[in-house]
Amino acid sequence: MSARGVEDARARGKTVLVLHGPNLNLLGRREPDVYGPLTLDQINERLHALAAEIGVELEIFQSNVEGELVDRIQEAAGVTHAIVINPAAYTHTSIAIRDAIVAVGLPVIEVHLSNIHRREKFRRRSLISDVAVGQITGFGADSYLLGLRAAVRVIANSRSRSLKTRRPLKARRPA
Ligand code: DQA
């Protein structure tokens, strides 16, 4: 096994929560030139296949409702080891989702199908990225798969810190 394989094996059996924000239930039909041809079910199938290959547990949840996404993030505390989230339009507006991420202190990987930095000005600002471990944007459905791999790496590298003792992330001070 490669060094990376040994490293990732430390994440085996751990749980990753994948959250899909509003309108992502329409994938496949919604602006396929921007978001690609795959439906959300097809993306989720690929995520499940990768999770099985790596040996991590996966929970997946989609909602068009901001508060439901906040609830799901709160419920992940002490249960889930990392979160992969595409907050969709809430990326650009949701202080509530940002606050929930800071509150639970779980490592978060932000993903987007399209490259938000190549699009309209209002999409270039993310309220999530500076409280996330990192952002993967512009690789279509592969952004989720790369996000899951990144989450596994983060879990493997932070195994010494137990979920119970992990302190919330420090939010950066506004400029
Ligand atoms: C998106 C980009 C957002 O700006 C947009 O509101 C979405 C999808 C993406 O995955 O590219 O709904 O998050």
Image (tube, rainbow, N blue to C red):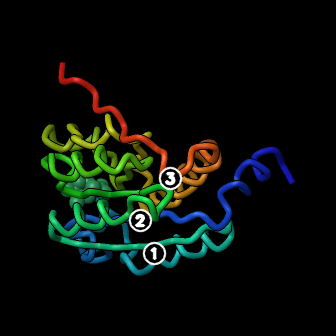
Query: Which numbered disc covers residue 83?
Result: none
For the residue pair 83 and 135, the one nearer the viewer reads as 83
Within 8 Å: ligand 1 and the Cβ of disc 2?
no
The three-letter code of the residue at mark 1 reads Asn
**Gap between marks 3 and 1 measured at Cα:** 26 Å
Q: How crowded is mark 3: few (under 14 residues within 10 Å), some or many (20 or more)?
A: some
SS category of the residue bearing label 1: helix
Query: Looking at the picture, how far across and down is residue 167, in whole percent?
Result: 41, 40
CA gap, disc 2 to disc 3? 18 Å
Measured as percent of width and height from the top left, residue 30 is found at 23, 71
* Residue sitting nearer the eye, 163 or 137: 163
Q: Is mark 2 in CB contact (under 8 Å) with mark 1?
A: yes
Hey, what amino acid is under mark 3?
A: Leu
Spatial separation of the CA atoms under disc 2 and disc 1: 9 Å
Label 2 vs 1, first from the N-terminus = 2
Query: Which residue is disc 1 drawn over?
Result: 44
Camera-nearest label, 2 or 3: 3
Name the quarter where the C terminus is drawn.
top left
Residue 41: give x, y in percent of width and height: 40, 81
* Among the two numbered marks 2 and 3 on one chain, the one whose residue lies closer to the N terminus: 2
Residue sitting at the far top: 175
Which label lies toward us, 3 or 1? Answer: 3
Q: Quadrant of the N terminus?
A: bottom right
Q: Mark 2 points at which residue?
A: 18
The residue under the point 64% across, 49% down is: 156
Regarding mark 2 in the picture, which secondary structure is present there? Answer: strand
